[in-house]
């Protein structure tokens, strides 16, 4: 786990595990990863098992990597993309 974020609002809390996955530590073969789809195919079984276990305790989980943070609109930054992802995840 890289970060545990907690949002408190109106007396209620939501917790989110934010995991930044680097190619060299979270894939079976980083040399074949050229896109988000490749990344998903190459995840280590350990990472997926650990995520499922943490989610079973009620935590929301957000995996990010160099592909998920790519800006999709003109003028958008990686920080904008991250803020959008966090907003959508905390809205659950």
Image: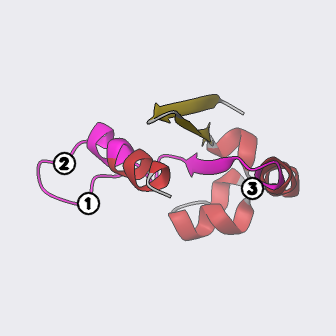
Residue identified by numbered label 2 = 76
How many other residues sit within 10 Å of disc 3, few (<14), some (14-19) or many (≥20)? some
**Cα–Cα gap, marks 3 and 1:** 26 Å
Q: Residue at x 70, y 46 (%)?
A: 59
Instruction: Using residue 20 as the reference point, say whether residue 56 is left or right of it.
Output: right
Secondary structure of residue under mark 2:
loop
Tell me, yes or no, whether the highlighted magenta stretch contains residue 20.
no
Helix, strand or loop at mark 3: loop
Residue 29: mark:
3
Q: Which residue is mark 1?
A: 72
Q: Determine whether label 2 and label 1 are within 8 Å by CB.
A: yes
Circle nearer the N terminus (3, 1): 3
Q: Are marks 3 and 2 in contact (CB under 8 Å)?
A: no
| In the foreground, 70 or 9 | 9
Q: Which residues are magenta?
A: 55-83
Q: Is residue 5 above or below residue 22?
A: above
Residue drawn 47% across the image and 46% down it: 66
Instruction: Tell which circle, 3 or 2, labels the residue nearer the N-terminal end.
Output: 3
Left or right, residue 69 beside residue 29: left
Towards the viewer: 13 or 24:
13
Disc 1 is placed on an element classified as loop
Other-residue count near label 2 (Cα within 10 Å), few / some / many at <14 / 14–19 / ≥20 = few
- Residue at 28% x, 52% y is 71
At 62% across and 29% down in the image, what residue appears?
A: 3
Q: Position of residue 75 (x, y in %)?
A: 11, 48
92 vs 65, nearest the viewer: 92
Q: Which residue sits furthest left?
A: 75
């Amino acid at each position: 786990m890289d970060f545990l974020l907690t949002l408190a609002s109106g007396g209620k809390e939501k917790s989110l595990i934010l995991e930044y996955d680097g190619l060299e530590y979270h894939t079976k073969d980083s040399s074949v990863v050229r896109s988000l789809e490749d990344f998903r195919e190459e995840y280590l079984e350990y990472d997926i098992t650990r995520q499922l276990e943490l989610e079973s305790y009620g935590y929301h989980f957000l995996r990010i990597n160099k592909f998920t943070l790519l800006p999709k609109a003109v003028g958008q930054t990686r920080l904008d993309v991250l803020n959008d992802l966090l907003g959508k995840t905390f809205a659950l």
